Structure formats: structure tokens, C-alpha cells
Image (cartoon, helix red, strand yellow):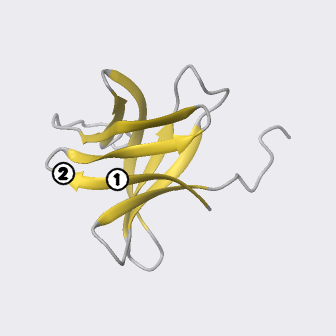
Amino acid sequence: MAHIGTFQANSDGFEGEVFMVPLTTKGVRIVKETKPNRNPKAPSHRIFVGRSEIGQAWPKTTNDDRDYLSLTFDFAGLSRPVYAILMKDPNSESYGAFWSRAKKPVFE
């Protein structure tokens, strides 16, 4: 897995930086939704740079019961969405965003 970001938890969710082509920037915010949504597939968080929404996130749990966020980055600068995870670093108070290439080919 490639490390593509570092974040700190805050009262609204998370804030940090992303370093991937074509987006390398600080001040990336993963903001928890405040309005309840009756759709169970709706994201729990929105990902922003400035006022621009660049993705969404959903809560998940690993097979060994560790919580994480499943991230989807999707904005005009990408040819297709980038899927990643946000997990707490077990050795610190920070969180890391990680990406890995899909195991299946995109076009079959």
C-alpha cells in the first residue's frame, strides 16, 4: 500500500495533507456529516480542499475489528476515482491515508 496522506483528528473530523499526483496539498479536511441521512449508502464524511468537495468517506471495520474510513477521491483532475483508506497509526495520534492498486483490471 502506498502512503498518500497524513491527518490529525479534530472536532469536525480530520485535517491534514494529501500527496498524490495530481493532488499534493495541505489543508485537506475530512468533515463528518452533521445532517442525518436516511440512505444507508450515503457517506458519513465529505472531503474538501478549500470550498471544493473532492471526495467522500464511509466508516468500515477490518476483520480484526479496527475502525477505518473508506475514502473515495473524485474530482475533475482525476481520470477515474482513487480509492483509499484512512487508519489510525497505532504508534501515534495521527492517521494515515493509504492507496493500493485494484486487484481486478478496470476494463475486462
Q: Residue drawn at (46%, 43%), measured in percent from left and top?
A: 18
**Residue 70's x, y, as percent?**
45, 52
Disc count in the image? 2
Residue plotted at (36% across, 77% down): 90
- Horizontally, is 69 left or right of 72 in the view? left
Quadrant containing the N terminus in the rendered view: bottom right
Residue linked to disc 2: 10
Identified by mark 1, the residue type is Phe
Which residue sits at x=36%, y=61%?
A: 95
Residue 100, placed above or below residue 83 = below
Q: Do residues under tags 2 and 1 come within 8 Å of each other at their CB atoms?
A: no
- Return the residue nearer the eye: 34 or 100: 100
Q: What crowding class fits label 2: few (fewer than 14 Cα within 10 Å), some (14-19), or many (20 or more)?
A: few
Image height of 15 relative to 80, above or below: below
Q: Residue at (62%, 36%) from the top-left corner?
A: 21
Q: Position of residue 86 (x, y in %)?
A: 42, 56
Instruction: From the top left corner, tell me how far across and down residue 4 is, in percent.
Output: 53, 51
Against 28, residue 67 (above or below) is: below
Left or right, 62 with reference to 95: right
Residue 64 vertical placement versus 30 (above, below) = below
- Distance of label 2 from label 1 (alpha carbons): 9 Å
The circle drawn on residue 24 is none
Local secondary structure at mark 1: strand
Type of residue at label 2? Asn
User: Where is residue 68, by image quadrant?
Assistant: bottom left
- The residue beneath circle 1 is 7
Local packing at callout 1 (Cα closer than 10 Å; few below 14, some 14-19, many 20+) is: many
Where's the C terminus, which quadrant? top right
